[in-house]
Amino acid sequence: MRLRRLILLDKKQLTVVFSRTFYVSESQCMNNSLYYEIPSKTNILIKAFLEKYTVESEYKINFVSVRDTCNREDWFPVFSLNIDGKPLWPVVYITYSKYILIGIPVMKKSDSSKRFDEIPEIPATIQLLDTFGCFLKELSTELSAENSSFDIEDVLNFVAPYGILTNSSLANFRTALSGTSNLAESSRDFLQSTAKQAPTISVTIKETVKGIIYNRKRYQDIFDYTGVVSLSSTLPVKTDISATLLTTLDLTHVVPGPTLDKFQDTSKENSLQLFLNPGYDVTEIFKYTFEKVKPPIFATYKVADNKPGLSFAINLEFFLEQKMTFEVIEVAMPFPNRGPINSLKFEPQNSDVTLNKKRNQIVWRRAKPPVTDKLLLTGELTFDTRHSKLDGHPQLRELNAYADITFKCNTSTMSKMRLDRESVTVFPGAKFKLSYEVKSSGQSVRVWNVLGEVFDQ
């Protein structure tokens, strides 16, 4: 559960003490069909709230039928507000000490037909508000002091930095402020104050591909590409960071993480402008997917009868739109339904090929291979047929076989996404060191034997 909006009212004066819109939650909610618009002006929302708010008679100034009639429904602690003819639901509130805490959570489509007491987001919102209220009550003396070292925003950044309940221990908050515990030592402010070098910003772009290569005209190969952009920083918690990412591909689906306050397409060479605040120990900025016809490594796999055993050939082709240096490429060729492998011959003989007896598979490994047009491995193998497992894999019968390809590359991304180093800025301004790395990997690209019949039936 995460909040879209949090408002803190003075219980006596009914005035706004603190208000926060969580932009990441708001953008997620906009992509959800169950979306109720929140007025941009806080006073409009508060006016609608106070028309229904009634806990003690002293808050009733004028008689309002929908609020004060004896036949009204009992909304406590959940309201559905009507603002200029538009509904806003649910609005959750609690009273704690001298405050009224109001929270509006992100809702799911499946919640639209449920009663409010059946929706998990509502009790979770109450728990978050209750925790925040407890902190404010216990810290009221420090908050009201003129020389206080923290304010309400600091408390919220600790309890629920992005509308998500993260920390509920008041003792941890106090020890973090005191600077005497491991928690304090791990905080960014403490790191910056004690480090002898400039604070750092580290950005990582990591992309992976999974897929199936059928090697058949009747079937279209399937590839799923995903990526994640993450950031870590030793800058102070309240420091805002902006950066621009460049890519030549359109991202098909973007899921913002809790660090991202704003996300916009600048319509300039497919550039993406990010505005974020790292907060407490949160590094993920956003996840995304994209589409490509082929991965950096494509393959053709052939397994044929060669009595008393089998012959095989695996051909790897590189489809590189940019310079990529592979740390490692690994191809696993299992034969689970046949007996244990008795013998293995392969070409080239200097290839790094091992036999995994436990899985009854051949593993071909190339560390930092030269990026040529093709890499080829051929070979022959025989089996101990006395111990064959005909029920080991329902699809791997006769010549039906597959190979799984995995790879790692730390020089470029498959989507060509990259960080514009010159665009990274911080506010308030400060000197920092920037580190940046990219990682591409194939987690499991499965290629089927072109001579098999598993897809031809």
Image (tube, rainbow, N blue to C red):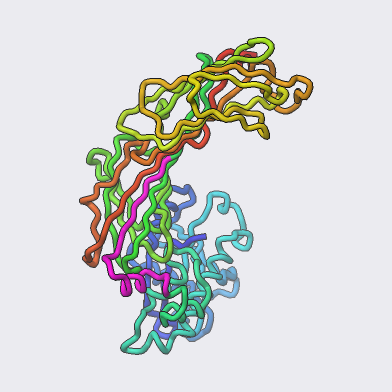
Residue 89 spot, x, y in % from top left: 49, 60
**Rendered image quadrant of residue 73:** bottom right
Report the residue at 39% width, 42% height from top.
Answer: 439
Q: Is residue 344 visible?
A: yes
Is residue 331 shown in magenta? no
As drawn, which residue projects farthest toward the right? 386
Of 438 and 264, which appears nearest the observer? 438
Residue 10, percent from left and from top: 41, 81
Residue visible at 43% across and 60% down in the picture: 282
Q: Tell me, yes or no, if residue 66 can be seen here.
A: no
Drawn side of residue 145 relative to residue 347, left or right: left
In the image, taking residue 162 as reference, residue 122 lies left or right, namely right
Q: Is residue 197 magenta?
A: yes
First to last magenta residue range: 185-207
Indicate the position of residue 100 as horizontal and vertical percent values.
47, 78
Question: 92 above or below 148?
Answer: above
| Image: 335 above or below 436 | above
Q: Is residue 19 above or below residue 436?
A: below
Please, which residue is most extreme toward the front here?
350
In front here: 412 or 79? 412
Q: Can you give x and y, in whole percent of width and height, for residue 311 in the image?
A: 59, 14
Location of the C terminus (image quadrant): top right
